[in-house]
Amino acid sequence: LNIVPFSDIFKSILIIKTAIAMIFILLSLAVTSLGIKFSKSITSSLENLLLTIKDVQEGDFKEAKKKFLKTPVDRDDEVGELYRNVQLMVQRIDELITENFLKQLVIKETQFKALQAQINPHFLYNTLESINWLAKANNQTQISRMVESLAFLLRNSMSLKKPLVTIEEELRIVENYILIQKYRFEDRLDFHMSVDPGIFQCSIPRLTLQPLVENSIHYALEPRIEPCKIRIYSILDKGDIKLVVEDDGPGMNPKIIEQIKEGKTKTRGKGIGLANIDERIKLSYGEKYGVHIESDPLKGTKVIVTLPYDREGFHVQRTVSG
């Protein structure tokens, strides 16, 4: 028989129970600590995102960027992906707001310049009106008519509200321009206009024909002493309108014509170039339409403007001579 006191057995059991309890407590503390640390790693990033979004909501993008720099996230889980996406979103929103702000500044500056630029035309119109009144008071009808035509041309050239006008309105611009040039060149300018009234209500980009007539005067009339014939006439061709500005000047060789069409050679006139007219027509009606030049040395020049015929009409020509 081996006799062991009960107190010794109980004492060993008590030690084991105490050790197990301590181990359990230590394990619980360790697991709790790890859990808290893990949860903080998630919640801190989410809390920072929430604060960042609040800064963005208030429009404080600088503070939002600072928070991103203070707490960089290099995790590969869903939280890290969310953090990076929000960071990119905030950066993009900031860029868009900055870009929009700069555009608004440019728009405001342009509006201011446009309002400022209106001062000079109004002053010029008032001055021309005063000259016109003075000319009429002194029975100077020629001066009065020139001033009225010049004011009409200025108003049309400076008006940006209607980029497209009717052919009838465009022909009125040409008529007023020719009126002024007739006083300058007198009998040397032999101008005729024969355009089908059936196309008067069709549209055309503003200031298409007048610059072409101006080029004819500079190329064909100015270099010579004898009279120069310039005429405008219309042709209806397979549903299209062809407006032709023709002169009997010295003409041009094909190489120069190609350079003018490409914008490499400027015309002698200081107004709108052929490339500008051609581009505006193509933008308005399509690549099928535009400006075409036919010219040979010593045989004159034809500038043909092709437009869509978008209106039914009758075909009796109106003739204007000057």
Image (cartoon, rainbow, N blue to C red):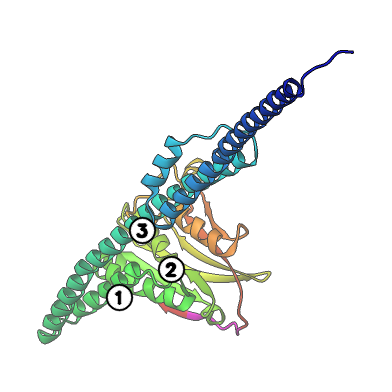
Q: Earlier in the sequence, mark 3 or mark 1?
A: 3
Q: Which mark is residue 104?
A: 3
Q: Which residues are magenta?
A: 313-318
Quadrant of the snapshot with the N terminus: top right
Give the quarter of the image for residue 210.
Answer: bottom left
**Disc 2: which residue:** 206
Residue designated by label 1: 152
Q: Is residue 253 magenta?
A: no
Q: For the residues marked 3 and 2, what is the alpha-carbon distance in whole angstroms? A: 29 Å
Question: Does residue 52 appear left or right of residue 10 in this picture?
Answer: left
Image-quadrant location for residue 121: bottom left
Q: Which mark's residue is nearer the viewer, 3 or 1?
A: 3
**Residue 270, image x and y in percent?**
32, 54
- Callout 2 environment at 10 Å: few (<14), some (14 to 19), or many (20+)? many
Residue type at mark 1 is Phe
User: Is residue 317 highlighted in magenta?
Assistant: yes
Q: Is residue 63 above or below residue 182?
A: above
Task: Report the front residue among 246 and 208.
Answer: 208
* Residue found farthest to the top: 1
Assign the magenta stretch its main secondary structure: loop
Question: What secondary structure is found at the residue carrying circle 1?
Answer: helix
At mark 2, the secondary structure is: loop
Q: Residue at x 15, y 85 (%)?
A: 136
| Numbered disc 3: secondary structure | helix
Return the x and y of residue 133 as percentages of the image width and height: 14, 83
**Residue at position x 49%, y 60% in the image:** 280
Whether residue 262 is visible, yes or no, is no
Kind of residue at badge 2: Arg
Furthest residue in direction right, as rendered: 1
In what quadrant of the picture does the C terminus appear? bottom left
Packing grade of label 1 (10 A; few <14, some 14-19, many >=20) is some
